[in-house]
Image (spheres, grey):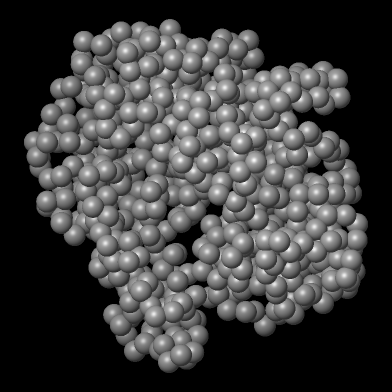
Amino acid sequence: MKPELGVCYYPEHWPQDVWARDAERMMETGLKWVRIGEFAWSRLEQSEGVFTWDWLDQAVETLGAAGLEVVMGTPSATPPRWVLDKYPDMLAVDAQGQPRKFGSRRHYCFSHLGYRTEAARMAKAMAERYGRNPYVTAWQIDNEYGCHETTVSFSSHARDGFCDWLAQKYQSPQALNKAWGNIFWSMEYDSFDAVDLPNLTVTEANPSHWLDFRRFTSDQVVAFNRAQVAAMRPHTDAPLIHNYMGRVLDFDHFDVGDDLEIASWDSYPMGFLEHVLQEEDDAWKAQYANHGDPDFQGFHHDLYRAVGKGRWWIMEQQPGPVNWAPYNPIPQDGMVKLWSMEAIAHGAEVVSYFRWRQAPFAQEQLHAGLLRPDSVNAQGQIEARAVYDELQILGEIEHVDADVAIVFDYESQWAWEIQPQGQGFDYFRLVFEQYRALRKLGLNVDILPANTTDFGARKLVVIPGLMAWNDALRGAIERFDGQIVVGPRSGLKTPDMQIPPSLGPDVGGAKTVRVASLRPNVRLALRNGGHVIRWYEDIEAGHVVETTNDGLNIMCQEGHVSYLAAWLDQDAYLRIFATLCATAGMTTENLPDGLRKRSTKDQTLYFNYSNAPVTHGDMELASGAYLWVRASER
């Protein structure tokens, strides 16, 4: 694979007489792809059924004739005002019963069948017009599902859809009552229509009720996306893509990805550091303020490679300061190059920058582009061109499966949000901290869904926090010869979110008797080094290999399967994972803070996220620098 570069462009924002020069400059920058159209519904259809295609026809012709390949976006993330006038009840509703009003974007409820039909109609109209256009060679459906907390809606349409979803799943109210344990607090129902949404209850709603509602909500995103896919498929053979976000966990991305050819995501390392990584303290954020977290991007690269079944892009790469985080510093010079190369080392087919020219109006005025508002090249353009030049030297980049994999499960995120049993318990964070430790050991990491049936030739598989077991994953574990480490909190529930008769986790010879959540200032020392933090389980076990200084059983083994019954700090994870890797025949290296690596078939990329130079063996990398090392030089 030879990676390519792209950019997001909004021809409707600029006079037509600048389009040709913009396209020429994009080619001069080394860009191959240009995404357009995803927010342009009001210009394409100013009133129902009255289309104005001429300007978009001209934009496609201008960009394509210059040598660019067009990614056409369907505009369902920004329905115009006339659509809301047609469907005044299409707005999503928050947990307090307040509608999410018009005047921004993503102002629709996934459960509204009228709007779903409207979005599919528009997608079909665009596919009919551009589906066979030789310049339109890929499609993006909608934009950033779930952004601005817009997945979960408590509208009347969501309630009606949920009742029908429950009827299809359980077939009888009696089966639902049993699955949810509704005898508790006299919550039994005699009809599906009697079931309400789980918000605004006096105290916590039934966790099984909540979990089914979250499953239903995720299915609505899948159905919304699928409606556009079905409308477009007869009219285009080009790949269909969606651009996911960072740490948006309220729908199952694997399920959406099953209907698409390519996964992409929008990578904003510094924005995410400030806005999304809320657990990190001020000192950490100050250290990485001009660089981004050293592992957050890598985690999502690996996640979306899995969602895309091996094919993935960066649809929006941060090119400079953004406008939407609590604080928005300027990236250190060189970081746009580093972020781009890191994505390429993880297997990205395309890295596309957001956006071409900084907008002088509306909500994103202070969001940098590759060009300044006055059309002068910004630092992002300079670095994008440098990436292109370097890619010509690097040539083909071939991805290989990692020796290590982590199983990631969206449903487990919902379950532990619903019933955290401790303020500090967050499933994403649990997985991410284990991923961070594996990366700090210099390892490539693949991410696998919870329905994986085969771990392949990998040597270590990590399964943290999996709410409930499934037969597919159990079969993969039984057939796997490598090392497996499970836990904590894996298998502690049934799919109905009840405690299983085995008391879980039913692996590694462990039985969980009690669970405990720890305050942030409580740390339990392990005898072999490191600490238990946030969570541990009181387990009965056979062969115990890790205990606290006070004698609590923390890790046990049965054959090649270990159960880790606690959330650990980085020192403990590094030590334990290094030992498991050695047992599995893998070599590890403890990288300095901020330094990471990613290996392809023929090269290894070392890159420094730190705000200071780092030394590793004979290598010294300046802050924000990277180095490709050929396989023969490793």
Q: Name the residue rendered at 67%, 66% in the picture.
A: 519
Above or below, 49 relative to 164: above
Q: How many marks?
A: 0
Above or below, 99 relative to 83: below
Residue 443 makes an appearance in the image: no
Locate residue 512: give its quadrant.
Answer: bottom right
Looking at the image, residue 376 sits to the left or right of residue 317; the answer is left
Locate the C terminus by quadrant.
top right
Q: Name the residue rendered at 32%, 13% in the picture.
A: 374
Locate residue 490: give its quadrant.
Answer: bottom right
Q: Name the residue rendered at 32%, 85% in the picture.
A: 191
Above or below, 458 relative to 313: below
Q: Nearest the camera: 613 or 403?
A: 613
Looking at the image, residue 124 sits to the left or right of residue 556; the answer is left
Q: Nearest the camera: 314 or 123?
A: 314
Locate the N terminus by quadrant.
top right
Q: Name the residue rendered at 64%, 14% in the picture.
A: 394
Looking at the image, residue 192 sits to the left or right of residue 180; the answer is left
Q: Position of residue 356 (x, y in %)?
A: 37, 20
Q: Position of residue 180 (x, y in %)?
A: 48, 81
Residue 228 makes an appearance in the image: yes
Q: Nearest the camera: 338 or 376?
A: 376
Q: Position of residue 27 (x, y in %)?
A: 41, 10
Locate residue 260: give its quadrant.
Answer: top left
Q: Position of residue 132 (x, y in %)?
A: 29, 27
Q: Nearest the camera: 251 or 201?
A: 201
